Amino acid sequence: MPEPTKPISVATLRDAVTAIFAAHGLTETDAARVAECLVEADLRNVSSHGINRIPIYTRRLCEKLVAPRPEMVLTCPTPVVARLDGGNGMGFLVATRAMSEAIARAKQFGVGVVYASNSNHFGMAACYLRQALAEGMAAMVLTNASPAMPIWGGRTAFLGTSPFAMAAPGPTPLLLDMATAVAARGKIRRAAERGEPIPLGWALDPQGQPTTDAEAGYRGIVLPVGGPKGSGLSLMMEAFAGVMSGAAFGGEVGNQYKDFETPQNVGHFILALKPDLFAPDQSYSARMDALVSRAKATPRAAGYDEILMPGEPEERMAEKRRRDGLNIPPADLDMLRTEATQAGLTPSL
């Protein structure tokens, strides 16, 4: 068994990750935002979208498949709807800018929508929901992704395992960030890297057979959650985030781990909404508090000690890790040191 690591503070880890991306040409501010998003995923126990993905992002930067300092172009056909050409920047930066623009419109008009194209993988969708919640906004975030999941009734990869993500502010904010697959493909990749099995029902192997072998599942296809329901949600994301934005769609989005010839051209759909349009702020907060209180007070099923709201388990874990630090697996620590060295830095961890 590998030796346990000592907890690393959030600030120390963010600084180390920021330095790596700044060394790859990002501005200090942009590098810090990428680091914030990656570390936040690990804080929330979404390690499939955390710092372990750094090598693929830096590789694509090195191979000039992603622009480190993108020239984003915003066009505004109406006061409340805009389109953002992400300039082939890192998805974290494109989605952050898109959400900022959506929030600005929502503050003025009650709602703001931004379609983004010419982007890349944006990590954990909850990052942009939290950005909206911090401004008191409700939000929806959709993106499309490279083919990994069949359309219902098909047998080959066509749809991405795109996240369906929504948030509503309140005394207990609601934050839903869920893959449209039974499990996010990143979780299967992470299990394969660790040599761990996956539950039956997550994926099919390359021969189309159910498997618990994570490597075989990663090379095969993942399965939609709820059968035709997950497939239908992912297809709608192709329409909203891909077709409507002008990005790649319908199986055209590049796989960041396999396609090294052209950029991904991922599309995003970002919506921000002023939640108290039809009720004063205090009334809205009271109504949201009542919704959560009633939900938590419902009779519990056998084996459940507490009813938790969407996003609540992740936020509790994040609060603990912000306080106590993160235990980074030895393999990830080695990766961070290697990435720092390759970027011409002296490893700080």
Image (tube, helix red, strand yellow):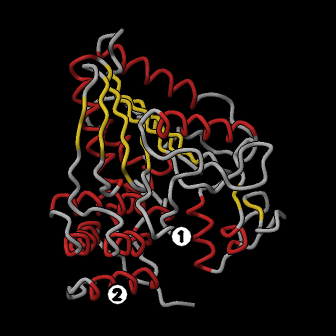
Q: Position of residue 291 (x, y in %)?
A: 50, 22
Q: Position of residue 110 (x, y in %)?
A: 29, 17
Observer able to see residue 123: no
Q: Quadrant of residue 194?
A: bottom right
**Which callout, 2 or 1, points at the residue further toward the start of the chain?**
1
Tag 2: residue type? Thr
Q: Position of residue 168 (x, y in %)?
A: 41, 30
- In screen coordinates, is 139 left or right of 212? left
Relative vertical location of residue 66 with respect to residue 164 in this rendering, above or below: below
The residue that label 2 is drawn on is 338
Q: Nearer the viewer, residue 249 or 311?
A: 249
10 Å crowding of disc 1: few (<14), some (14-19), many (20+): few
Observer able to see residue 284: yes
- In screen coordinates, is 104 left or right of 306? left
Q: Secondary structure at mark 1?
A: loop
The residue lying at 38 percent from left, 63 percent from top is 321
The residue that label 1 is drawn on is 258
Image quarter in which the N terminus is found: bottom right
Please, which residue is most extreme toward the top here? 278
Image quarter in which the C terminus is found: bottom left
Tag 1: residue type? Lys
Proximity of marks 2 and 1: CB atoms separated by less than 8 Å: no
Q: Secondary structure at mark 2?
A: helix
User: Can you tell which mark lies on residue 105?
Assistant: none
Q: Position of residue 203 (x, y in %)?
A: 73, 60
Distance of mark 2 from mark 1, alpha carbons?
Answer: 22 Å
Please, which residue is most extreme toward the right here? 209
Please, which residue is most extreme toward the left here? 28
Relative vertical location of residue 207 with respect to residue 105 in this rendering, above or below: below
Q: Quadrant of residue 54?
A: bottom left
